[in-house]
Amino acid sequence: MGEKAVPLLRRRRVKRSCPSCGSELGVEEKRGKGNPISIQLFPPELVEHIISFLPVRDLVALGQTCRYFHEVCDGEGVWRRICRRLSPRLQDQGSGVRPWKRAAILNYTKCLYFQAFGGRRRCLSKSVAPLLAHGYRRFLPTKDHVFILDYVGTLFFLKNALVSTLGQMQWKRACRYVVLCRGAKDFASDPRCDTVYRKYLYVLATREQQEVVGTTSSRACDCVEVYLQSSGQRVFKMTFHHSMTFKQIVLVGQETQRALLLLTEEGKIYSLVVNETQLDQPRSYTVQLALRKVSHYLPHLRVACMTSNQSSTLYVTDQGGVYFEVHTPGVYRDLFGTLQAFDPLDQQMPLALSLPAKILFCALGYNHLGLVDEFGRIFMQGNNRYGQLGTGDKMDRGEPTQVRYLQRPITLWCGLNHSLVLSQSSEFSKELLGCGCGAGGRLPGWPKGSASFVKLQVKVPLCACALCATRECLYILSSHDIEQHAPYRDLPASRVVGTPEPSLGARAPQDPGGMAQACEEYLSQIHSCQTLQDRMEKMKEIVGWMPLMAAQKDFFWEALDMLQRAEGGGGGVGPPAPET
């Protein structure tokens, strides 16, 4: 029916009228033959069927032309047909207020990008996309493979994803994917940044278990299944009582004393310890599930999410509070600057961080961390030897310190000695900022690193939502969920007035950050350079140190590049001009 209708629309003059907005778009005057036909005379099913063949981008553009097409293009019938076209094997469209539109956009925007740090190729590449996946919710790279979890709980295993060709990491074209398991809620592996240590994959899933042996009745029980990352073979499984339901799993500790932390739906933390070196042996184990001290001694707290590294764990409550577990004295000293309150005999006792507002999400590196509050402010704490806190200097911070020139990040990631921030630069573009150590190409465009967050030479996808980095690659996950809204709110006027930011007038002479002294030091460094080109390079480096907005830094870098080219210096090491 749709194929016959298209020639009809071509033969007759069509009048697109929008009675609700009182305007006529594209009306052709009568020229002696025939009368124009209103598109509203066609059956709604026919219009939806024709429109459903449009690409998603064109469909959204058509819905912005007038109120009539907005209502037609936003209908669930159109999105149901688009979803069937994008994912013909999708059995369940999911839940929500607009399930078909949400499912279609999730599958249209799903993609995993990667950029190798070494080699000549400096651009993002797409990975193999599993056709059965219903959007991308989480991903985790291991030594040789990549694991992706979709929105219906299917965990995919992308085998032999990355290969090394002449020292350059590339995505293997013959990469194939298999379904590792279904009914998965969450998964985790060794929390260290080096993927060499990620030998096992721990999957939190729901399985049907028989109530009584020999009967057909069953009930859903949560379990943890352990898989070998190299082959995807399951080597261990533990099942919990049906009364206990979990929603998140993280790992902490060494291989011989690997602690599994499980977060329940009620906000309680349970833990158990396994020995990874014995998991591949065919024998049965007895493990004990115990309540973690953060839930035992603080029963009123309801933990919303948690993150971990090898020697510490960070808990965020539903009220925005943050509690810390630190298990080694070295990391404790890096994070807090002292060992005064560290108790080696009671390492699970949680420590509360003093924060000015409710925390929404966090990131935890080896010896530094990042926090984002409800107003979109970023706070960094810990070791700053390489400038990984982004404060403009290399002084350690024993308490959360605000990075004032960055606000409202999409996501934050902390690694071994560098940090990354995914930010919304404008309504239709995003950018990736980084600080810290730049060795090995981990900060593209900044091989010497930076003590402030600088714009990296990475073309960020429009729907990027998550990222992580390994020793070899940078990974960016693209997925858009229409039910996830901006979590930030505006900062109250009273708090804006009370902030110690330097401004004009009477408050200018206070100089709380010592900026005047720092500028004098910068001038002396520029004066010590012998040639004009050296002074230009030093100025670029100083611009990266100063607490400026990202747009301001791009302006100064581009201006310095123009001056260098005018003097015959030929470019430089600064970042390129911002993309238009």
Image (spheres, helix red, strand yellow):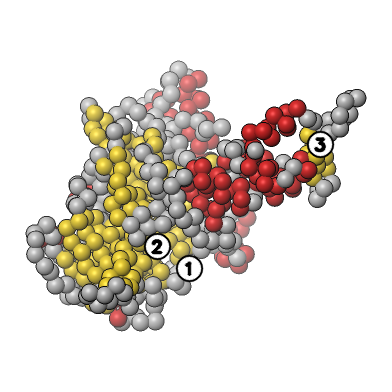
- Image x and y of residue 319, in percent: 46, 73
At a point 24% along the width and 29% down the height, the residue shown is 165
Residue type at mark 2?
Answer: Pro
Q: Can residue 75 be seen from the camera position used here?
A: yes
Residue type at mark 3?
Answer: Ile
Question: Helix or strand or loop: what does disc 3 sit on?
Answer: strand
Q: Is residue 265 left or right of residue 427?
A: left
Furthest-right residue in this view:
32
Question: Helix or strand or loop: what does disc 1 sit on?
Answer: loop
Q: Is residue 152 left or right of residue 211?
A: right
Q: Which residue is mark 3?
A: 37
* 3 or 2: tag closer to the N-terminus: 3
Foreground pick, 169 / 435: 169
Q: CA distance from mark 3 to mark 1?
A: 58 Å
Q: Which residue is mark 1?
A: 358
* 1 or 2: tag closer to the N-terminus: 1
Q: Which mark is residue 400?
A: 2
At a point 30% along the width and 55% down the height, the residue shown is 181
* 3 or 1: tag closer to the N-terminus: 3
- Image x and y of residue 343, in percent: 21, 74
Residue type at mark 1?
Answer: Lys
Q: CA distance from mark 1 to mark 2?
A: 13 Å
